[in-house]
Image (tube, helix red, strand yellow):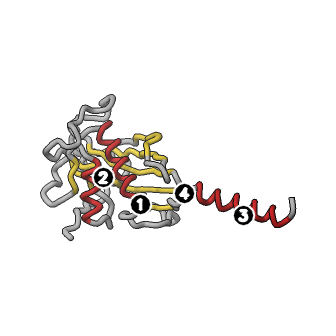
Amino acid sequence: MPRPHRVVCVFALVVSALIASGCVGHNVINPVADGERGFSNPNSDPIPPLMIEAVRWVATRYPPEESAEWSIGVANLPEEGAAGTRFVVNLPQGVNRLVYRRVCELIGFGAAPMQPGYESLPTYHVSRIWVSGDEARVDVIRPIKGLPAGADGRPVTQPITVRLRGGLQPWRVTSHNVWSFNSLPTPPINYMPEQ
């Protein structure tokens, strides 16, 4: 093959590899370590779809009415349009009002954005979000009902790391890891902005 054709073929191969890998990039929301960096706007894609899928997945497998971790199977939750708030979602700092509302609407099952007066409702906290290409991990801290608060007065919660794949396709849960009770700090309450 003549040299110009080889250069064109290599260039075409590199361009197709870049296009096929997607345009998701690397995102870290609420980094724990100083070394975790990336885009950090929780209002831009792919962060909202990841929060929706992760919280919906956790809430259907660990519903707010169940009294403890040993509940088995997927819960019988009401239809997505059912009336009444069943649980509250506490999203990361920086999420604007429109995204906050939309995320809770799309989670469904009675999810409501965190607002003053809702602090006593069962709360699912989105703690951290990592995105690298078409892979993501979201830490969701779920409420544990039926167990007394700890010695420090802190309610009992349980972190669940949800692993997802997606990128150019809809995000879907591939696996999860259930952590010990109160093993991750519960993020501070972040009310849905008024504006």
Amino acid type shown at disc 1 = Asp
To which residue does mark 4 refer? 22
Q: Secondary structure at mark 4?
A: loop
Front position in the image: 54 or 148: 54
- Do the residues under discs 4 and 1 have CB atoms within 8 angstroms? no
**Placement of the N terminus among the 4 image quadrants:** bottom right
Q: Earlier in the sequence, mark 4 or mark 1?
A: 4
What residue did someone put label 2 on? Answer: 125
Q: Nearer the viewer, mark 4 or mark 2?
A: 4
Q: For mark 3, what is the residue? A: 11
Q: CA distance from mark 1 to mark 3?
A: 29 Å
Observer-side mark, 4 or 3, equals 3
x, y percent for residue 186: 31, 54
Q: Residue at x 30, y 52 (%)?
A: 125
Residue at mark 1: 45
**Sequence-earlier tag: 1 or 3:** 3
> Mark 1 touching mark 3, by CB under 8 A?
no
